[in-house]
Amino acid sequence: MPRETAAVAVIGLGAMGGPMAKNLLRAGFRVRGYDLSPAACRALAEAGGEPAPSPAAAAREAELLHVVVASADQVEAALFGEDGAVAGLPRGSVVLLHSTVPPRFARDLAARLSSTGHPLLDAPISGGRVRAEAGTLTVMASGPAAAFAAAERALAAIAAKVFRLGEEAGIGSSVKMINQLLAGVHIAAACEAMALAVRAGVDPDRVYEVIRESAGNSWMFENRVPHILARDFTPLSAVDIFVKDLGIVLDAGREWRFPLPLAAAAHQQYLAAAAMGLGRDDDSSVVRVYERLAGIEVRGRRRDEAQGR
Amino acid sequence: MPRETAAVAVIGLGAMGGPMAKNLLRAGFRVRGYDLSPAACRALAEAGGEPAPSPAAAAREAELLHVVVASADQVEAALFGEDGAVAGLPRGSVVLLHSTVPPRFARDLAARLSSTGHPLLDAPISGGRVRAEAGTLTVMASGPAAAFAAAERALAAIAAKVFRLGEEAGIGSSVKMINQLLAGVHIAAACEAMALAVRAGVDPDRVYEVIRESAGNSWMFENRVPHILARDFTPLSAVDIFVKDLGIVLDAGREWRFPLPLAAAAHQQYLAAAAMGLGRDDDSSVVRVYERLAGIEVRGRRRDEAQGR
């Protein structure tokens, strides 16, 4: 068992890292955090955590280092850049990589961290901001058994379900990549379908109601269509996330000479939404690509269903 | 209330119509049926129904005429072709159109049947063969209130859920079209994702297990991936069905000048499977397009999960 006052560091206090830090605090951890945004640091302080002036400072006494930044480039900077966390992290402390990165990046990172004496858990997360806040994320992780053991209590504080997928880094990120392929395609399909429904002249509220009970349903359809019907594009997860994550999927396909026509078509729709200036809006904004092209609007009657899940 | 011995006709006794006829028999209806296949007619007789030599003969005394053929062309032939059902059907009897057809076809059909005194329920079904057998289909229907009332007991015998979507024909078929867009894209995405997982070197059984609990899940992913893992491509619903149904979706998009990049990409994958000679195999055979191209196989360890739903 870790000590009650075990110290953890959280690098990246955004939509996912912020709520995760709070849940670690609630579970009794001492949490030092770092984020480029002063507002995110203030929120951590208000929740009882300790904002640090650099990743290295945040990592100084940590037994666990949670990395929850947005991209592989940001992971690189946070760990190995100026005042990077690895320089400050005690030898033997475990790095938990929660960001969605290329599987190859995760594998290479494990090798680099091995040389500094830091085990890596390749531990991407799924569930979005709402489940990050509830502490009920899904973690799809791979890494050494000892690292899982060291991180057990922290993972329990942030996740409802932790999949242990193997000993080697890269497996967790590969499975996350597969999840993102599906999630990205399903959101774009939901937008395409709801826009076509309105173009066909049928009531989008009824379509949502019927599809939820039919074979056309998906987790993302059920979760995102209420945002569309309520015209609430406040980002729970942004268009730019899928520009990046389907980019990772398509880069893997290119490297492996593996055709991915569905993922490629969906990626174009996220790029189209980003081209409209909607990159930082909710990913369900892809519907506005169809709306702008066809001069329609997918608007529901009720506005009380725009709940995340 | 209809009489206990109310007579219904079922035209088309295939994967969907056959089980529906049996459930109507179980509910106490007298069922006359017609199908081009002698085997399908024999199966009806064995279940206690009466095979008829033509659609007109099947319809002769029917209060309800269920049309469960595969396409608009087949509907046209069954109703208005030589010895077509409409010629035999008593005036006032309700036609239930369960086939997936273009919304425009359903609207036109309602107008034509109105001139012969036959109300139409535009009543497509969702759920696949397994739920047809269980009598738990979803019906997405539109038509006159009196027609719903006349068909109420029969619909209860075949469906767990009947959505009443409006008074006008075409609405039911439009909502079914939206469902098929999503279902078709989701199956193709499931195949693409599982194939990429194997190419990435991760265990497809574990991927299935993780995705089922993650945001990448869909009704179709959960239902079809077990067929793939078990290498069981016995058709519960065939590749050719989505060649047709996504064709309906794309024809509507073309007519309305409405872009559907996801549906179009998925349709190409069903065409690719059909080109491989797999048109009559289960629609999850789309995975074999990726497999053949990349020289891989998505095979699970366990073979006991290939249950339809």
Image: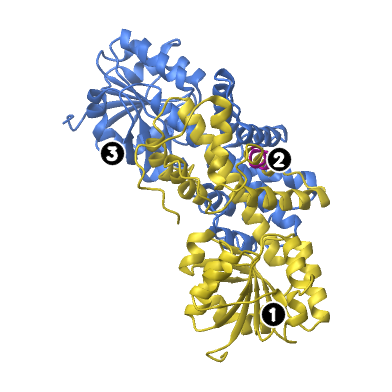
Chain colours: A yellow, B blue
Mark 1, residue position: A57
Mark 2, residue position: A261
Image: A269 above or below A145: above
Q: Given this view, does label 1 or label 3 mark the residue nearer the observer?
A: 1
The Cα atoms of the two marked residues, 1 and 3, are separated by 67 Å
The image quarter in which residue A139 lies: bottom right
Q: Which residues are magenta?
A: A267-272
On the same chain: label 2 and label 3?
no
The Cα atoms of the two marked residues, 1 and 2, are separated by 45 Å
In terms of secondary structure, where does tag 3 sit?
A: helix
Q: The disc numbered 3 marks a residue on which chain?
A: B
Image: A50 above or below A122: below
Circle 1 crowding by C-alpha within 10 Å: few under 14, some 14–19, many from 20: many
Q: Nearer the viewer, residue A237 or B222?
A: A237
Magenta part mainly helix, strand or loop? Answer: helix
Q: Looking at the image, which residue is at 39% across and 26% down?
A: B171
Q: Looking at the image, which residue is at 63% across and 53% down?
A: A180
In terms of secondary structure, where does tag 2 sit?
A: helix
- Amino acid type assigned to the residue bearing label 1 in the image: Ala
Q: Looking at the image, which residue is at 62% across and 51% down?
A: B228
Question: Measured from the top left, where is residue B250 in percent x and y?
Answer: 59, 26
Which circle's residue, 1 or 2, is located before the other in the chain? 1
Q: Nearer the viewer, residue B4 or A206?
A: A206
